[in-house]
Image (cartoon, rainbow, N blue to C red):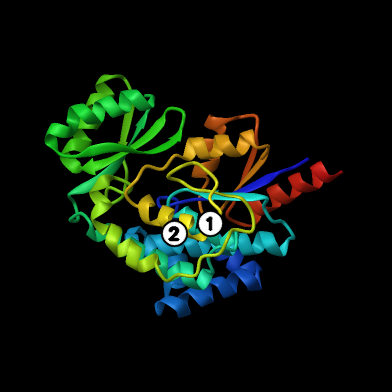
Amino acid sequence: MVKCAFIFPGQGSQYRGMGKEFAAMSAGAREIFEEADDILGMGLSKIIFDGDAQQLRQTKVTQPAILVTSMAAFTVLREHGFLPDATAGLSLGEYSALVCAGSLTFTDALPLVQKRAVYMQEAVPDGKGGMAAILGLGPQEVALLCKEACHLGHVEPVNFNCPGQIVIAGYVEALEEACRLAKKEKARAIMLSVSAPFHSRLLATIEGKMFSLLKDVDIKKPSIPFVANISACYINEPQGIRDSLIKQVFNPVYWENTIELLIRDGYNLFVEVGPGRTLTGFMKKINRDVKSFYVQDGETLKKLLNHLEEIAL
């Protein structure tokens, strides 16, 4: 028996032209991009399809762009009669997952995501904070590196993505020191192309703004199981979801634990819905025995649909 989970990517998965093929092949996907332009009062689809990479890297553009592209991909899958049994999203991807689960409407989620992006960007002055991926060390080792680097400013582990990959966030000087210490331990350290220390306690200053942003939003019970980032647990009560979304911006993301929970509960097909294949890469490191696909264009959609036909025979 196939139990499928749709998983949605977060910031960093964007690329120029994402979703363009889906907009060309599906009226439903095209309507998603057109609706986004109307909701935001800007030519977001033009930036996504034809803008330059620098435009797309601006957090206030990136976050709504990824949500829109993910929803376009989801629309195409739904048009093919394929829907999930559960859902989760990495960081920003939680908003896509909640739209997928019927908890949020697309109309509500899109401006939420844009304002969230602005608040996150403004929390720490541009150029003062950032993030880095540490490859090849475990959680305790990375925590120790951060502790040793904290004399230069705050830095902490914030994304527990998969075995051997932990993302840290904080002030740039402390980040660079933690990366230097990691390399000294024969690990790899890669500074990420983001302009703020997402999911670190440095963003706790925007808790009040996130509360105000979300307090009156209509959040419904998910129609399918939804797993939250900050706890790696199922949440189905609207107030619990609201609280989780507020806390998520300044608390760690437990992605590896999220996927392990779904696998333990029998989910055996994971589909990354939206731009990129980052989450599919994480899946291979978390559990290579579980089938995973990514769907971002016509070719990758065809691969998934062919697989579904094969297992239905």
Work out whether residue 17 can be spotted. Answer: no
Work out whether residue 71 can be spotted. Answer: yes
> Residue at position x 52%, y 45% from top?
277
Q: Which quadrant is the N terminus positioned in?
A: top right
Residue 245 x/y as whole percent: 42, 56
- Quarter of the image for residue 254 reads top left
Identity, as a three-letter code, of the amino acid under mark 1: Glu
Horizontal arrangement in the rendering, residue 40 relative to residue 296 (left or right): left
Horizontal arrangement in the rendering, residue 139 relative to residue 151 (left or right): right
> Residue at position x 75%, y 42% from top?
2
Asked whether the residues under the numbered discs 1 and 2 touch, taking CB atoms below 8 Å apart as contact, a structural biologist would say no
Residue 242, disc: 2
Bin the neighbour count of mark 1 within 10 Å (Cα to Cα): few under 14, some 14-19, many 20 and up: few
Bin the neighbour count of mark 2 within 10 Å (Cα to Cα): few under 14, some 14-19, many 20 and up: some
- Quarter of the image for residue 92 reads bottom left
Residue 312 x/y as whole percent: 83, 45
Q: Which residue is mark 1?
A: 237
Horizontal arrangement in the rendering, residue 153 relative to residue 204 (left or right): left
Residue 196 x/y as whole percent: 26, 51
Circle 2: element type: helix
